[in-house]
Amino acid sequence: MDKSYSDNISEVIRNFLIKNKWQYVFDQATGIYGFDVFLADADKTIRYMVDVRRNTYTVIANFSFKDNENYCSDNRLSEFTNLVNEDLSTGNFYINHKNKEICYKLTHDLRKVSLEVDDVEQKIYYAAAKLQHYSTGYEAVLNGAEPTDSLAECRQKLVNRVFNNIIRKKE
């Protein structure tokens, strides 16, 4: 049976994980990597799955709301997810209700570009940044906030962070 994934792409991802001394598991039959990263700022562990294919790899990063007693599968979470996805230019969020997880998915198509370790690093950290950025909005919705208000707060935090970085660079 032919492998359904690229050894070259897999090797670049493995090199990134080794370079950063991250513990991971790899399923040679499917071409899927799994690893966890703890975000101290958000006090969350992000669970990653990187699915390697012949010409692409997909980063799926997720975190759990299993401990949130307010978790419910009502329409407000879906509404917030839709609003967030409208804001994104790359990737998308989805809700895994079975596992009570919020997931961010990003696929990198390599048919017209070569792959470097820096590309993998960028995609993995980008996924973490998106989860971290919108996690406060998801938490707020779970605690009763309106989805539109939560998204406005997420947007304002981003504006403040960018503004503060510009001010620091000028100083």
Image (cartoon, rainbow, N blue to C red):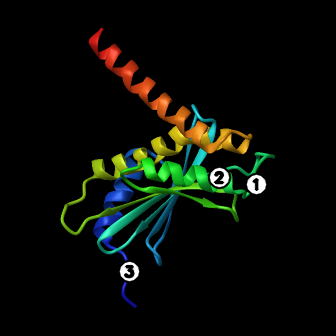
Q: Is 112 placed left or right of 97 in the picture?
A: left
| The C terminus, quarter of image | top left
Residue 76 at what x, y percent from top left?
A: 67, 51
At 33% across and 68% down in the image, what residue appears? 56
Residue labelled with disc 2: 77
- Secondary structure at badge 2 equals helix
- Placement of 146 over or under 116, stated as above or below: above
**Residue 47 makes an appearance in the image:** no
Q: Amino acid at mark 2?
A: Leu
Q: Amino acid at mark 3?
A: Ser
**Mark number displayed over residue 19:** none
At 81% across and 46% down in the image, what residue appears? 69
Residue 71 at what x, y percent from top left?
A: 75, 50
Residue 68 at what x, y percent from top left?
A: 76, 45
Residue 24 at what x, y percent from top left?
A: 51, 56
Q: Which picture quadrant has residue 138?
A: top right
Q: Amino acid at mark 1?
A: Cys
**CA–CA distance in space, label 2 to label 1:** 8 Å
Of the pair 76 and 20, the residue shown nearer to us: 76
Q: How many other residues sit within 10 Å of disc 1, few (<14), some (14-19) or many (≥20)?
A: few
**CA–CA distance in space, label 3 to label 2:** 35 Å
Residue labelled with disc 3: 4
User: Mark 2 near mark 1, Cβ–Cβ under 8 Å?
Assistant: yes
Of the pair 23 and 120, the residue shown nearer to us: 120
Outermost residue, bottom side: 1
At 41% across and 56% down in the image, what residue appears? 91
**Residue 17 makes an appearance in the image:** yes
Which tag, 2 or 1, sits closer to the chain's start?
Answer: 1
**Mark number displayed over residue 72:** 1
